[in-house]
Image: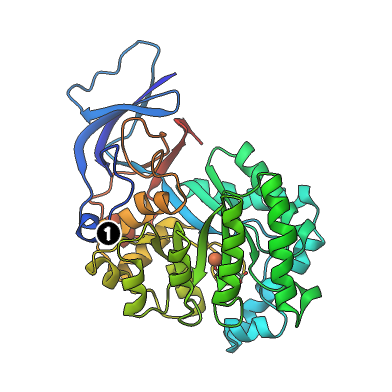
Amino acid sequence: MRTIIYNIGTLAGILPGDVRKLEGSQMNTVECIENAYLVIEDGVITEFGKQITNQVGNDGCEYIDAHGGFVMPAFCDSHTHIVYAGCRDGEFRDKIAGLSYEEIAARGGGILNSADLLHETSEDELYEQSMVRVREIMAMGTGAVEIKSGYGLTVEDELKMLRVIKRIKETAPVAVRANFLGAHAVGRAYRGRQSEYVDLVCKEMLPRVAEEGLADFVDVFCDEGFFTVEETDRILTEAARYGITPKIHANELEVSGGVQVGVKHGALSVDHLEKTTDAEIEALRGSCTMPTMLPGCSFFLGIPFGNAKGYIEAGLPVALASDYNPGSSPSGNMRFVMALGCIRMRLTPEQSFNACTINTAYAMGVSDQLGSITVGKKANLIITKPVPSLAFIPYSHQTPVIEQVILNGTAI
Ligand code: NIG
Ligand code: FE
């Protein structure tokens, strides 16, 4: 099947095939072609360029008229927890009343509250509830999503979550990567016995997850009140025996040492980073690890935004993801993430665009296939209404400008 998108006002986000991420000043530009066309064959971009004629052929190809809008790569969301049961709207009231994320968690709410709900929910029901969110994010332009476990916190419930993620991978047109986050919080049955819970993660959960091939990545919430650097080191050492690459939650609540331990283990990304010092920037320099910030979490919790600008000025790459989850970021709208990148982190529209596309693709290990307009990459694309500029997309962030989302070459 050959599909031709024509009348493209601006084709944005063009990159050479060997670029896997952008860092420092490379993030300042988004290469575009005005008045363009793009050809898709069998779900893959095979050609694009300047449109010479307006002629639509009668040749059996499918033609899509972009009506002068932007065509850009679909967003890649490299950090989500969208497989969960129910929601936490009750805690929303506690939060409004003034309780912090840590205080809600300390009262037995938070992640443990979601674990209780998930325990009572069947695998089929969990899949159905999660697919509502998967359809929601696809419609908002997400073409690749990383999904974490971490609301199971028992061997069986962690496996249940990861099997649901596998089913989403097999049934939804969006590209999915699975991340095993057994060390998200200490399960209720292990209260006061944290080191025994870490044993459970290492000796029972990880072998089963590896045996069933359920995880592309392993994650640890390495932060104040959750898991220590030593525990993280132990879990990542164990995961390395199974060849599972780490991604880390670090420095959301305190400067935790999570960045350094992640870099030491070759983490693909270290995520959150609301609190950082120069030491984290130095640790990341020259590494293969993508610093990833989650402005939707900062927005929702009212905590500081990560210093994305400082990282870029230091020559590092930065990715921005949604963190879609029921406790700290109940939204998977990557366009809003891109807008927060500009409005609250003072990134330019170009920097924020690159942070939400090619760099998040890198942070979930798919930048060889997704995250830019490149011949040979998957045709996961957004077509917008005619808009005056790239800046308009984050600037007018509530205006519904997304006209069509194309995944694997097919409009959803
Ligand atoms: O990335 N920080 C840890 N985990 C999630 C929140 C999970 C929850 O509260 O349910 C996050 O913000
Ligand atoms: Fe998270």
> Which quarter is ligand 1 in?
bottom right
Nearest the eye: 185 or 339: 185
**Are there few (<14), some (14-19), or many (20+) residues within 10 Å of tag 1?**
many
Give coordinates of residue 285: x percent, y percent. Answer: 30, 65
Q: Residue furthest bottom?
A: 98
Nearest the eye: 289 or 38: 289
Q: Quadrant of residue 334?
A: bottom left
Does residue 344 appear left or right of residue 271 in this picture? left
Residue 131, above or below 185: above
Does residue 273 appear left or right of residue 243 in this picture? left
Please name the residue shown 23% across and 51% down the image: 389
**Dot 1 lies on which element?**
helix
Give coordinates of residue 409: x percent, y percent. Answer: 44, 30
Residue 353, above or below 313: above
Give coordinates of residue 278: x percent, y percent. Answer: 31, 79
Residue type indicated by callout 1: Gln
Q: Quadrant of the N terminus?
A: top left
Q: How many marks?
A: 1
Name the residue tied to disc 1. 351
Question: Can I make out residue 114 in this image?
Answer: no
Nearest the eye: 116 or 160: 160
